[in-house]
Image: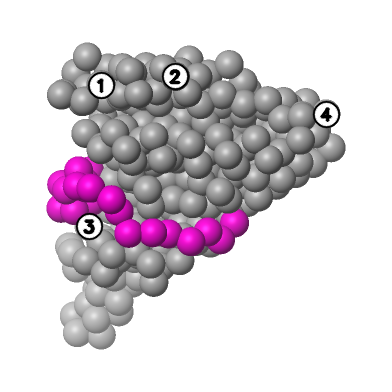
Amino acid sequence: MPSNLHDESDINSTIGSCRDKGITVVVPCFEEPREIIERTVSGIRDALEKLPAFDFEIIVVDDGTEGVDYGAALKTTGVKHVRHHVNRGYGASLATGIRHARFEWIGIIDADGTYPYDHFPSLIDETQDYEMVIGARNWGEIDILRRPAKMILTLLASFLANYRIPDLNSGMRVFHRRIYEENWRLFPHRFSFSSTLTMAALTYLHDVRFVPIPYRKRVGKSFINPVRDTVRFFYQLMRLSLYFRPLRIFMPISAILGILATARGIRDYLLVGSLGGLTLILYFMAFQVFFFGLIAEIINKK
């Protein structure tokens, strides 16, 4: 398990900033219009070429798109093109891009035209002091139908991480690849990859910075299923909380059961002068949940 102790001097001397080391920008895509991919890649290159003496590469990962030849379009632009023969998911595409990356610093951005690729230099500048820099969207710019679920998930994640998270699953960020490599078994193949990355960085106390960015209307069709992927992410969030911060889940449940047991016990004593069976069961459950949390915490620290 990685160390939870970081300081700025250790970060700078150990991994160096993105400005010094260069960056691999991974662009996952699935059935996106070819002109959107070309525009995104061109925009990323123009933004990064403005940085003096800065080395970078761009990897486009095609997640099994049929009927569109991204490779032919990207070959002349010097972009590395990697293709999955079948659709494996957003997270799997990012993982493939990271495995093929030449640099220690990784940038990711969605290929749908929603994120401002011209803001990459401002994110890169922050890597002097941070191991992950996340482009935080304004809530008002997110689709109103998706906003309630995202807010609930973000509030829950903030509680679990004990950190106020402005944007849990932003698809535009820069991070050191060791955050992924130290936790690669945790990452799902689907849409919860970026959320897992945020939670892993915060719960392991990596230095994370959120930088406000604008967010545009999506170009093309969205492949996110609001119901299915929200349920899937709730499951993933519970899994992460039990892995990283088990007491953040078990302690509140134990406390609630203890309060209910005490209230029931007072009622029993006032009415019959002794504790009833339900009171004893609630107390037993409260202690049981508490000790389950301690055991999980001990196992987690090994």
Q: In the rendered structure, find residue 281 and report the number of the disc placed on it.
A: 3
Q: Earlier in the sequence, mark 4 or mark 1?
A: 4
Q: Which segment is the magenta one?
A: 211-232
Please provide percent x and percent y for residue 34. Answer: 29, 34
Q: Earlier in the sequence, mark 2 or mark 4?
A: 4
Return the residue at label 1: 69
Residue drawn at (22%, 57%), measured in percent from left and top? 281
Q: Amino acid at mark 3?
A: Ile
Q: Earlier in the sequence, mark 3 or mark 1?
A: 1
Q: Earlier in the sequence, mark 4 or mark 3?
A: 4
Mark 2 or mark 3, whichever is nearer to me: 2
Q: Earlier in the sequence, mark 2 or mark 1?
A: 1
Residue drawn at (17%, 62%), measured in percent from left and top? 277
Return the residue at label 2: 76
Residue drawn at (43%, 40%), measured in percent from left and top? 40
Q: Amino acid at mark 4?
A: Ser
Whether residue 42 sits left or right of residue 228 in the image: it is right
